[in-house]
Amino acid sequence: MAGPLDLAMLDPAATAPFLTKDEAAIRLAADAKAIDALQDRLYAEGTRALLVVLQGIDTSGKDGTIRGVFNATGPLGVTVTAFGEPTKPELARDFLWRIHAAVPRRGTIGIFNRSHYEDVLVARVRSLAPALEIERRYDHINAFERLLSDSGTTILKFMLHISREEQRQRLEERRSDPEKRWKFHPGDLDDRRSWDDYMAAYQVMLDRTSTEWAPWTVVPSDRKWARNAIIAGVVRTALERMSPKYPDRDWSGPEFAVP
Ligand code: AMP
Ligand code: MG
């Protein structure tokens, strides 16, 4: 297990290592470009995959992260999957069934907007499954992610950490802004009322599912510019470590001369 992540000790308004918005913007642009180039190699290589899991409470910025971090990435090899309330056919299977069906194929980057972690977050807070079953899910998740990792998928998990006050402001904005009103769901207010329960559930999640093969990064997300730059940096570093290579093919022989 990686080192402990203590939510109460992590300031959602932190921006480190960035001091200014401009500095973060410059780094983000460079990292986004690098991610695009690396993604092209990953696709050409076609043997491994990257899975980016985005978790966070309502308004924490999951959609904005996808737009901000991957806006320079060619759409060819990227899939985004949003997980909402499970459908009837999904509920008729184990909780990982729909998740496994959406994992990125070799050569691609898969982004999860919410994920199997909802099954230990909202499910825990709202008691959507028996407590014993939810307890077992942490081990199932770790084993599942180990399987993906052993199968060539690098996994990065980001928890977008915002303060309670920041969420209040963002929900207020959603309620009133004509361009954001469509995103407002009265049900989000119930989740907000359960703020402490959610934070407790997130803490258990971090404690029990931070593994060497699928680490969590808690991203301070009150400042959107810091959030995007931090995540882009982690994604870039992970891709650089994977170091995907263009396949070495030799088409120099005369039989391949273009007629
Ligand atoms: P949104 O991301 O705003 O479109 O909302 C999706 C909703 O689906 C959220 O309220 C989630 O809590 C809910 N959701 C996602 N996954 C699950 C799950 N496995 N069980 C129950 N609710 C879920
Ligand atoms: Mg929502």
Image (cartoon, helix red, strand yellow):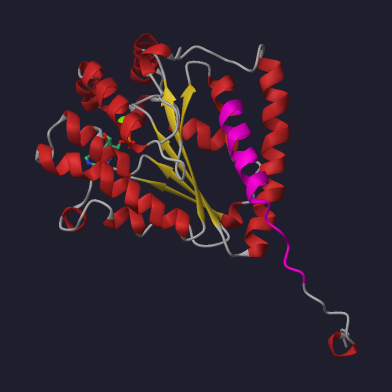
In this rendering, position of residue 89 left or right of residue 258: left
**Residue 257 seen in this snapshot:** yes
Q: Nearer the viewer, residue 225 or 158?
A: 158
The residue shown at (33%, 45%) is 83
**Image vertical order of residue 108 relative to residue 200, above or below:** below
Q: Residue furthest bottom?
A: 255
Expressed as whole percent of the image width and height from the top left, the position of residue 131 reads 11, 37
Taking the image as four quarters, which one is ligand 1 found in?
top left
Residue 173 drawn in magenta? no
Expressed as whole percent of the image width and height from the top left, the position of residue 115 reads 35, 43
In this rendering, position of residue 74 left or right of residue 253: left
In this rendering, position of residue 217 left or right of residue 92: right
Quadrant for the N terminus, please: top left
Q: How many numbered discs sit on the rendered protein?
A: 0
Residues shaded magenta? 229-248
Expressed as whole percent of the image width and height from the top left, the position of residue 5 reads 41, 23
Residue 246 drawn in magenta? yes
In this rendering, position of residue 107 left or right of residue 179: right
Q: Which corner quadrant of the image does residue 92 belong to?
A: bottom left
The residue shown at (53%, 16%) is 223
Q: Which corner quadrant of the image does residue 128 belong to?
A: top left
**Image vertical order of residue 213 relative to residue 178, above or below:** below
Q: Residue furthest top?
A: 165
**Image vertical order of residue 108 relative to residue 219, above or below:** below
Quadrant for the C terminus, please: bottom right
**Residue 85 seen in this snapshot:** no
Q: Nearer the viewer, residue 185 or 16?
A: 16
The residue shown at (29%, 21%) is 199
* SS assignment for the magenta stretch, majority: helix
